[in-house]
Image (cartoon, rainbow, N blue to C red):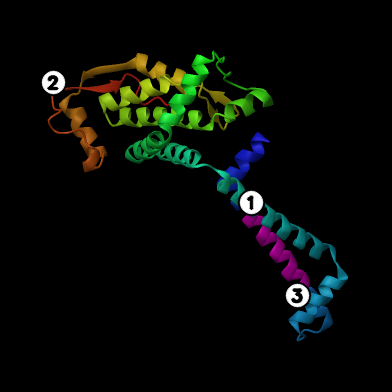
Amino acid sequence: MDQIRQFLNGITALIASATLFLIGITALVVEIKRTQGTLDPNGNFTNAVRAALRRRSPRLIVGVALLVLAAGLVSAYLSVHAARSVNEQLRDDSWAALNTKDWPTAIARASKCVDQFGAQAEREQQKLTADHIPLPPTGKVSPEERDGIWARGVLNDVAACYFIKGQAAQELYRCGEAKAAYQAAAGLPHARVWDPAGFFWSPAEAAEARLTRLQCRLIHREELEGFHARNSAHDRVPRRLALHRRVVVSADRKAHAA
């Protein structure tokens, strides 16, 4: 079921449905043209369609079946996306921006998720801690454990967005913002993130690992100028952060989370 959900949630489902639709239409047109030619090369197309339906040739049956399957895929794709909650959409948009290295957009979308659902996630985490609920497992889990993890959708998505915000801010040399986001993610230990490879990981643990490696050091003038050249004006480090101003730079800032 996990693989089916991932398939329907991606663009591959639309590509597959479009392919099936084209093959189905081609099969139908070929069969109808063949029937029309058999009846009369100049015969009525409508009559040819009716004749083809009466004959129920294998090509016609396959064509209709492919069209039905294509329609079913589109319907399932739309259902899955319509069922996504606002926090899921913001989470996915944040990941998409991060994966394309659009750091400002990743921060903006992750911040929107945190602003809307952060308080709810913190209340849920506080209750889980107060009730002494064990931390959910990471890696591959059983169906029962998976359902329990996914039931905490808001908590999971907010923690993921804190982690995304921290990583994007780190790439933009934003010291306080990166540290605060990682600390917030680390404060939600019951949250889990689903990896398409087929396992769960902990954003709190990943954030803590990045915090331990987070260092402040001097940025040399050449490095600062290179940063200015790579980023748009509204996201540049201010010119006043020349030599002797400290900003956060991770020792391994180019390494991405597992």
Residue 207, position as x, y percentages in the image: 41, 21
Q: Which residues fall within the magenta stretch?
A: 17-33
Residue at the spot of label 1:
16
Count of marks placed on residues: 3
Q: Sort mark 2 into few (<14), some (14-19) or many (20+) by Cα contacts within 10 Å.
A: few
Q: Earlier in the sequence, mark 1 or mark 3?
A: 1
Tell me the mark number nearer the camera, choosing from 1 and 3.
1
Residue at the spot of label 3:
33
Residue for point 24% across, 18% down: 216
**Cα–Cα gap, marks 1 and 2:** 56 Å
User: Which element type, helix, strand or loop, lies under badge 2?
Assistant: loop
Magenta-drawn stretch contains 25? yes
Dot 2 and dot 3 residues touching (CB under 8 Å) = no
Residue at the spot of label 2:
244
Q: Is residue 189 visible?
A: no
Q: Quadrant of residue 200?
A: top right
Tell me the mark number nearer the camera, choosing from 2 and 3.
2
Q: Describe residue 217's horizontal placement relative to residue 86 as left or right.
A: left
Q: Sort mark 1 into few (<14), some (14-19) or many (20+) by Cα contacts within 10 Å.
A: some
